[in-house]
Image: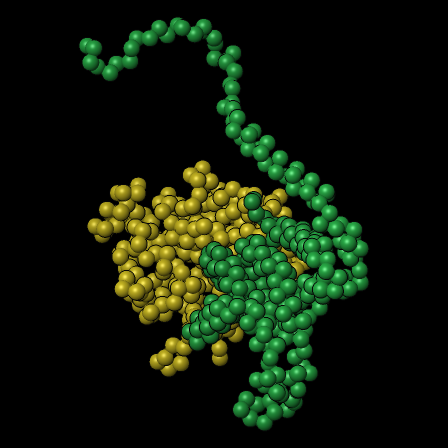
Chain colours: A yellow, B green
Amino acid sequence: MSSATTVEKTPAGTTAKVEIRAVHKNFGPLHVLRGIDLDVRAGEVTVVLGPSGSGKSTLLRTINHLEKVDGGTVSVDGVLVGYRRSGNKLYELREREILKQRTRIGFVFQNFHLFPHLTVLENVVEAPVSALKRPRKEAEAAARRLLERVGLADKAESYPKQLSGGQQQRVAIARALALEPGLLLFDEPTSALDPELVGEVLDVIKDLAATGTTMIVVTHEIGFAREVADTVVFMDEGRIVEQGPPADVLDSPRHERTRAFLSKVL
Amino acid sequence: MALTSDPPAAPLTKEPAAPATDLVVVPVRHPWRWVAVAATAVLLVQFAHGLVTNPGWEWDVFAAFFTTETVLKAVWVTLQLTFHGTALGFAIGIVVAFMRLSANPFLRSVAFGYIWAFRSIPLIVQLLFWFNLAYLYKELSVGIPFGPSFFSFDTMGLVGEMSAAVLGLALHQAAYAAEIVRGGVLAVDEGQLEAAASLGIPKLRQVRRIVLPQAMRSILPNAANEVISLFKGTSIVSVMAIGELFYQVQVVYGRNGRVVPLLMVATAWYILLTTALSVVQHYVERHYAKGSTR
């Protein structure tokens, strides 16, 4: 049984759990991830904190196989991401199969990466139409509902360049949601924004958290972590230093490095 | 304290103390610019005067030949060479460009070798090679490589003068087109590919819908240059005695000796059609500028 078919069996809109086991990643001589183990329960919000260079963005990118791992496994809802296991071997999947797996995982980038030559509506509709083969009419209706949800119903015909950074990021979130993913990954979604625009994006993410979609958010917004996270994970030098409920990790960190980091950002 | 550099206590009240709102801004004058304008204008007028009064231009001959059937037919041949050369050249060029961008080192090297070879061989030399293809290969056949063949053609019959010319122009063009397309694809932000990949958009669709439309913005100005230079470059095909514009004009002035007015006939057609191509370029570029602010 190929994992691609397993992915299809999971009905759209349901929420997924994530299991990361002993993940290693090297960039040349740089050992960026040094054995990461992490469990994210379905419907939970996990916030990953850590100094820059600690490997948190790389970890996030391994979850939808934008980054291949050099060791260990990532699975979403019990299905290996990017590989098929047969006995003791992991066979890398074909690109087509990996692309199919990614339709179950939404990814929001720090720099939005909207398609600049397509309108907001076309940006949101593109993946459902081309990857999920949804009829265009249906996809457009769904896209308009999503744009309304992120407060941009009136911008459907605009081009990304005509929007503010905060609006662009909200479109990017709508675009990720259009695939009705069971898991949403956010890579520093507010780091490229002017301070006064951060709030509108965080509000949208908070609303999503309340709907019970599994989310993993890499961010520097400690206040957001405290308010929304079920679990806070602190990473440093490619390892998870500590994790737990926000009250524990943020208010009474056990580890010296966590304390040092928090004292700098708070 | 005579040795200090304190500014002298100049009387600050020398100028009448007008309120700042009453001051008028005077832009700097450029007298030499006007001299340059005058000199350039004189030269232009002299040139125009010469065009009108010098009998050597023989405008009556120009008018008589500008739209004769021979010339119009030759213009048509030139346009055909340009169109087929461009279409085939860019088709091959796109393939070579993606080979050079491929992850496979063998495909990459072959593409590199192709570009290296065809950029190194002068077009005219290459054209003469194609023209003499029948000398190298009497027969062309379709079949199993190194095995039996299913069909075969007489090279002379299949690769006529016109196809030899188109092939030569296209293969030459493809080497340049490949680099232009590759440059355009590389100019697309990597984040665009990551975004498309993260959304699970199928690979071919990524290329067609996300990458190429954005690459077109940097491809187009260079591609238009290439089309225009190919259009004028077709005149080189005259060495193969193909009846394109420049060849035909040479034939006519060989007969009647009116060299200058007939060269002007060709010149005027080249200018006219290049202008038309530039207009097309403008509109195509505008199409691909959708969503852009500049």
- The residue closer to the viewer here, A115 or B1, is B1
Numbered label tally: 0
Horizontal side, residue B125 vs residue B259: left or right: left
Residue A179 place in picture, x, y as percent? 55, 60
Residue A244 lies in quadrant: bottom left
Residue A265 percent location from the top left of the image: 30, 43
- Tell me where residue A121 appears, x and y as whole percent: 61, 52
Whether residue A54 sits left or right of residue A164 in the image: it is: left
Give the camera-side residue of B58 and A183. Answer: B58
Placement of the N terminus of chain B among the 4 image quadrants: top left
Q: Nearer the viewer, residue A19 or B15?
A: B15
- On screen, A203 above or below B168? above
Q: Write the residue at 54% across / 43% down.
A: A163
**Residue at image location 34% in from the left, 56% down from the top:** A56
Residue at 57% across / 66% down in the picture? B173
Residue A142: tell me if it is visible. Answer: no
Q: Is residue A90 left or right of residue B229?
A: left
Residue nearer the viewer, B77 or B243 = B243
Q: Is residue A170 visible?
A: yes
What's the residue at 32%, 63% (across, down)? A27
State whether residue A54 is above or below residue B162: above
- Say whether residue A139 is left or right of residue A10: right
Percent coordinates x, y for residue B101 in the rendering:
47, 67
